[in-house]
Image: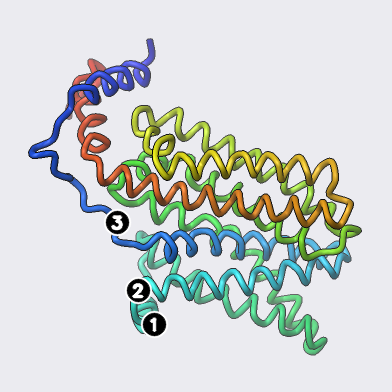
Amino acid sequence: MTTRSRVDGQATALADEYVSYYNRRILKPPTWRAASIGGYLYLGGLAGASSVFAAGGQLTGRPGLARAGKAAALVGIGLSLAALVEDLGRPERFLHMLRTFKPTSPMSVGSWLLASYAPLVGVSLLTDLTGRFPFTGRAACYGAAILGPAVTTYTAVLISDTAVPAWHEGHREMPFLFAGSATATAAGSAMIAAPPSENGPARRAAVLGTALELGAGWLMRRRMGMIAGAYEHGRAGVLMRTGEALAVAGAVGAVLCGRRRAAAVASGAALMAASACIRLGVFSAGVASSEDPAYTVVPQRARLASPETTYA
């Protein structure tokens, strides 16, 4: 029996008999609102991955795909910033985060990423729509594509760098889960907005993104042991299962029927809804794991009880 299975078995046994002091919480649950921060997590991923699609369409002579990606990136980052500011309460609080740059802080790095990325996607789309300053627009599009992957995944680092069990314990796989989710939803957006004759790259990306999204999620829950229960029960469980089913349906539709306009729109909508459900499921699992003290104490006790545990 491996160390991981021994620890998980001990954690399960401890969980069956665990009762906290007066059944009180050990961690303070996140005060973030699901609509604001859940939307922030989802929309930032849509924006970052869409910039990559836009650059790809621009490079390969697919103007419809490029414009669809630029529009999705601008709408996504604009709404993402609005959701973040709404949760902060006052717009100036976001500006205050730009007074310093701290490479060890995911929030600081993320704030500067957003502040650098948003103008690029704005210039990229504006020059495309007006036809003016084409060289500047192309440069802005490629610049946004360079920052896009970081915009897509930094939120995974942000939530993993907390004490919330369901987020922190998934720190290894969470960036891959977010990257796959963002790729799938950006592909879905491109399938909806781009002409069917140009959506071939989006259809292929939908399959790859879905595979990464589902594979990373499965590996994360398998490695987390009992903490995976936060993703499998309650509201989070419903959202995760719904998202996974929609993701599979969207990817299958993209492969089999994506060349037809109506089917491409339906498959794209399924992919976008799937990503939203999974992001909200991750958010809900984190809240649930912080509200139940067993998710904090039981894994710690199991690790302490493991014979492989050593002390410096």
Label 2 Cα crowd, 10 Å radius (few <14 / some 14-19 / many 20+): some
Residue at x 79% of width, y 49% of height? 203
Farthest-out residue, right = 197
Residue at x 53% of width, y 50% of height? 277
Q: Amino acid at mark 3?
A: Pro
Q: Is residue 161 left or right of residue 125?
A: left
Residue holding disc 3: 30
Q: Amino acid at mark 1?
A: Pro
Query: Does dot 3 land on a helix, a strand or a loop?
Result: loop
Which label sits on residue 201?
A: none
Q: Is residue 41 visible?
A: yes
- Which scheme is used to colour this image of the protein? rainbow
Label 3 Cα crowd, 10 Å radius (few <14 / some 14-19 / many 20+): some
Q: Amino acid at mark 2?
A: Leu
Residue holding disc 1: 91
Q: Is residue 187 visible?
A: no
| Residue 176 point in image, percent of width and height | 55, 44
Q: Is residue 40 left or right of residue 268?
A: left
Query: Does dot 1 land on a helix, a strand or a loop?
Result: helix
Gap between marks 2 and 1, in whole Å? 7 Å
Query: Does dot 2 land on a helix, a strand or a loop?
Result: helix
Q: Nearer the viewer, residue 166 or 267?
A: 267
- Where's the N terminus, which quadrant? top left
Farthest-out residue, top = 1
Q: Quadrant of residue 69?
A: bottom right
- Where's the C terminus, which quadrant? top left
Q: On screen, 244 above or below 270?
A: above
Residue holding disc 2: 88
Label 1 Cα crowd, 10 Å radius (few <14 / some 14-19 / many 20+): some
Residue at x 35% of width, y 44% of height? 168
